Amino acid sequence: MRKKEFIGSVSILIRPEMLLASVIEPLLRGIPTEVWVMQKDGRILYDAKKQEIGKMLFSDTLYKPFPGLLAIGERITKEPQGNGTYEFYEKESMKPVMKEAFWSTIGLYGVEWRLIVTRYLKKGK
């Protein structure tokens, strides 16, 4: 009979953007919404625009011209769920558009991420 003794451990590293993309992207096909996921410190873990993954919302120069985005980002970090509006670039172009966002908290093993779903309120000119 074997004793119940500790013989080692396993450590696993994941790339959140790959895990999240495998779940989110199939669900959004053909739906006029966008999804991004952010840590509570402002780091973007997932975005359909791959160049935004890993950026820090509150310090990256890409986001500085959009005070409404930074303001809603502050709310997102503090409130486990909510909604609001902000202006940021359209997914397909660099044209600013107004977006409506709804967010909720997802978590695992004590780590919380904010899942943000957005839709355009009006298209840019």
Image (spheres, rainbow, N blue to C red):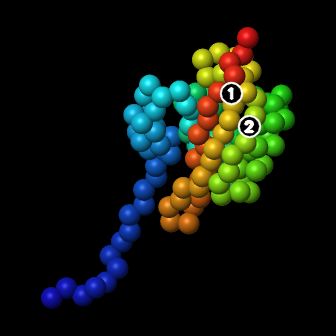
Residue at which label 2 appears: 85
- Residue drawn 76% across the image and 50% down it: 75
Q: Is residue 77 above or below residue 45?
A: below
Q: Amino acid at mark 1?
A: Leu
Crowd around label 2: few <14 · some 14–19 · many ≥20 (10 Å): some
Element assignment for label 2: strand
Q: Is residue 32 above or below residue 38?
A: above
Q: Amino acid at mark 2?
A: Thr
Provide residue 77's location: percent of width, then percent of height. Answer: 72, 53
Q: Is residue 56 visible?
A: yes
Provide residue 67's location: percent of width, then percent of height. Answer: 84, 35
Element assignment for label 1: strand
Where the C terminus falls, by quadrant? top right
Q: Is residue 37 above or below residue 26?
A: below
- Residue drawn 73% across the image and 42% down it: 84
Name the one closer to the observer, 58 or 102.
102
Disc on the earlier residue, 2 or 1: 2
Provide residue 79's location: percent of width, then percent of height. Answer: 71, 57
Mark 2–mark 1 distance (CA, rounded to whole Å): 9 Å
Check residue 70 in the rendering and tell me which mark sits there, or answer none.
none
**Apparent side of residue 2 relative to residue 97 in the rendered image (left or right):** left
**Apparent side of residue 55 relative to residue 31 in the rendered image (left or right):** right
Q: Quadrant of residue 53?
A: top right
Residue at which label 1 appears: 121
Report if the CB atoms under discs 2 and 1 are less than 8 Å apart: yes
Q: Quadrant of residue 30?
A: top left
Q: Quadrant of residue 43?
A: top right
- Residue drawn 68% across the image and 27% down it: 121
Provide residue 26's location: percent of width, then percent of height. Answer: 39, 34
- Residue drawn 42% across the image and 36% down it: 27
